[in-house]
Amino acid sequence: MPYAHGLASRLTPRLTGLLCALVMAGVATPVIAQAGKEKAARHYEDAQVRFDRKDIPGAIVQLKNALQADKSLLPVQLLLARALMIDGQAVAAEVAVTEALRLGVDRAEIAVTLGQSLLAQGKHRQMLEHASLAPAGLPNSVRMKVLLLRATAFSGLGEEANALKAVAEARSIGPDAAETWLAEVPLRLRARQFKEATAAADAALKLTPTSAEAHYQRGSIAHLRSDLPAAIESYGKALSLDPNHTESRIARAGLYIDTRRDAEALADIEEARKRSPREPRAAYMKALLLERAGQRAPARAALGEVVGLLDPVPIDFIRYRPQLLLLAGLAHFALDEYGKALPFLELFHRAQPGTPASKVLSQIYMRENNPDRAIDVLEPYVRSFPNDSQALTQLSAAYLVKGRPAKATQLMQDALKSRDAPEYHTVLGIAMNQSGDSSGALAQLDATFRKDPRQIQAGLALVPLLLRQGEAARAVQVADQMLKQRPDDAALLNLAGIAKAQAGDFGGARRNFDAALARDGKLIAPQLGLARLDIATTANDSAMQRLKAILKADERNVEALYDMAALLQRMGKLEDAQRTLERASGLATKSDPRPDFALIELHLRQNRASAALDVAKGLLAKVPDDVRVLHTYARVQLAQGDNLGARQTLVGASRRAGFNAEQQTEVAALQMAAGDDAAAAYSLDKALSASADFVPALVLQARLELGRNEPAKAEARARRIVQLQPKLPVGYQLLGDVASARGQTRAAIDAYRQAYKAQPTSATTLALLRLLSAQGEAAETRSTASQWLKANPRDLNIRKALADHLARQGDFSAARTEYETILKTAPGDAEVLNNLANALLQLKDVKAALAVAERAVARSPTNAIVMDTLGWTLVQDGQHEAALIKLRDARLRAPANPEIRYHLAVALARSGKRAEAREEVSAALQDHPNFESRRAADALLGTLK
């Protein structure tokens, strides 16, 4: 069959036959009944004249008047049935035929009308099984027509072989009947048997060269074979023979729309609407033209007219009319009524698989998060139409959602061999990113967007990838380029705000978020963006107010709960943060484990590894095969000291990661932390076999080689990284590590300086500071840190590094100032509290040290180092019994720490427990010949002999 606007356009029987409920409302009031057969006869004769003149409504009125006079007149019942059928009142026609049968009419007289009425109601199986419609015993002329009706019924039921058999049987009765050839054409077209369809149409034209239907069918064949000029010519010929041939007019209008001959299309549409005011296809086509002209409101009104005509029709009426199914589905889809569109499109797809409607149906499945069904629909279509770029990209997207990036990548690579389409590059980049090849994805998407900034999908995928790679400036540039094309797009405004926030342009980010809300005040994402800006700028009260407003409107908003927990942690309200994350975890779907991850991190930061393990176990039970979850579970096992368990977990994670370079690299990093370098090397080999130049994997390989004392290999790999990513610091940092391993201190410092110069970030600054401090470069360490903090005063990591450096240098007063500055922003940081307590001890401010140490233990009650600091402070304060409680606890948690054992020995000695003190200090000295308090420990042991 041909396709209007690329889809089906054939409709048999007339559409008005499906709208009996609407037409019945216009039936005239019957004339008051009059007695007598003479009056009934006069009404009948008048009705016959009207029927012959095609005044069907008038004929129906007169026939009903006749029945008022005499209900037993068979000719009246028969003519009424025919008239009702022509008028589209299939149910009423069936009633009239049934009454005629009851009155004793021969079935041959009503067989054709009865069959038509049943088909019009979608009663295909009933038509085939109805006793009065059995072909055997009917006169040849009637039997031939009934056989053709049976062919239509079989075809509607998908029994094409039986349909062709019925056509052949009909042709054996009337070999010169054109209708037997015309009936074959749509059957052949549905099977894409163009040669046979053409032969049948030519046979019909030879028999009836002036048949409008025959010319229409010839046009249908040309239409499906994409011979558009020939199709338009055939449709025009049909209309010249019969201006009322609606199918030809609708089909030609569809072709005009496809070829952008809008004026000619509109003329055909208006003529069709004039001749058939209730024709829904004409209304749909008008909507297409209005949409193309940018008249969205009138277009939606026209679509509303379509569904207004079709929705009241019982589904059985249109179940076997593919074009009406398609029309209803497309209209509802265009009105964003996807739930209503789905059943119509599914029925159409079953009747006519392999049409462009497959693409629309797959979009609905994807909206329902059902990629399996989308793939089932698209794969056969793509096999038939391998060059349909839209279908190819849709299928690739479905593969990606299904978690089959390799399949999507291969599909796009094959497609690019045929045509260098930017949309293929876009999907390929997204697939590569999902496969773990973030470097390749970044290059692919960036090149695509630079070549054609109109590729919005490429830009949307590129911005988050750039942000993840730390290239915020480029991400802002891409987002702004997209905004130039769509300045009122709230989603793009929000994305630009996210990019600018990460780039440090908080003012620009705020303006973008505000603009997004101005377009759509109900959007949550920009509200969250503003709250996150408030958090980043320590406007905690404002952030809290925004998040509470979001949660007031939707208390189950997981994003807001997640951000609320982050804010509460920043404010030092860790118990509240924990409760908030637990609530978010309970509300989040399986596909969003972020609250669980955050809860695990919160427990780990407070050294509550057992609590973290409980959360991790629950998460693993929900998604046992998720690589990220296995990775996190292994981290918790490592935090508990269960290296063997972590190794086993990571073996499973590596197996499930397959050849995903990014995931394999993350697994390898933990395997190295677990001391399983051999397994880490295997995971990295898999990562690099998938993406030979995946920089994070190269970095870990270099570090493994350094650990194996293979500096030459590590150096070669580091130089390859510099070659691949000269603007990233990691290659230079590795060169610094290699130089340090070789004892080349100055070369190491120079390499770290180069890393800092390549990308002056918190990470490169921190790495340089640590090396400078370790090498005794006190002045440069202090000046570098101070210079960075002058520009980035909120960088707590650098301030911590500076404070620790000052403490190591013995400048405890300056260290105290830096620690106290940090605590103004992060009052709950147990590590900083602990270090401040030690600095205060060195400054002989024991009371202040004691207060701070108690705060540290309150924040991290299971941390042995923090507990030791409090115990040692109690010793200095003369509270020896209280000190013993804390130091014994710390010693049990970290028996291998010589400082803790020395501190415990001092407390024991001062409490008169000399033997136990001697045992503790001896163990510290025996197992650890060199530690900070070694001399003091030797002196203590001397007093205990």
Image (cartoon, rainbow, N blue to C red):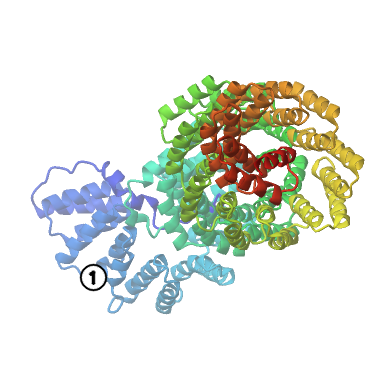
Q: Is residue 153 left or right of residue 499?
A: left
> What is the quadrant of the C terminus in the image?
top right
Query: Label 1: which residue?
Result: 107
Q: Nearer the viewer, residue 460 or 738?
A: 738
Residue 632 seen by the camera: yes
User: Which image quadrant for residue 82?
Assistant: bottom left
Q: How many marks?
A: 1
Residue drawn at x 62%, y 52% as measured from the top left: 390
User: Which image quadrant for residue 109?
Assistant: bottom left
Q: Relative to 287, does residue 188 appear above or below in the rendering?
A: below
Q: Which type of secondary structure does the marked residue at label 1 adopt?
A: helix
For badge 1, the amino acid type reads Arg
- Residue 356: image location, x then y, percent: 55, 55
- Residue 401: image location, x then y, percent: 56, 53
Q: Nearer the viewer, residue 166 or 56?
A: 166
- Residue 448: image location, x then y, percent: 74, 45
Residue drawn at x 40%, y 43% as measured from the top left: 307
Residue drawn at x 32%, y 48% as measured from the top left: 55
- Residue 418: image location, x then y, percent: 74, 59
At label 1, counting other C-alpha atoms closer than 10 Å, the crowd grade (few under 14, some 14-19, many 20 or more) is some
Toward the front, the furthest residue is 945
Q: Is residue 788 left or right of residue 604?
A: right
Residue 469 seen by the camera: no
Q: Nearer the viewer, residue 789 or 822?
A: 822
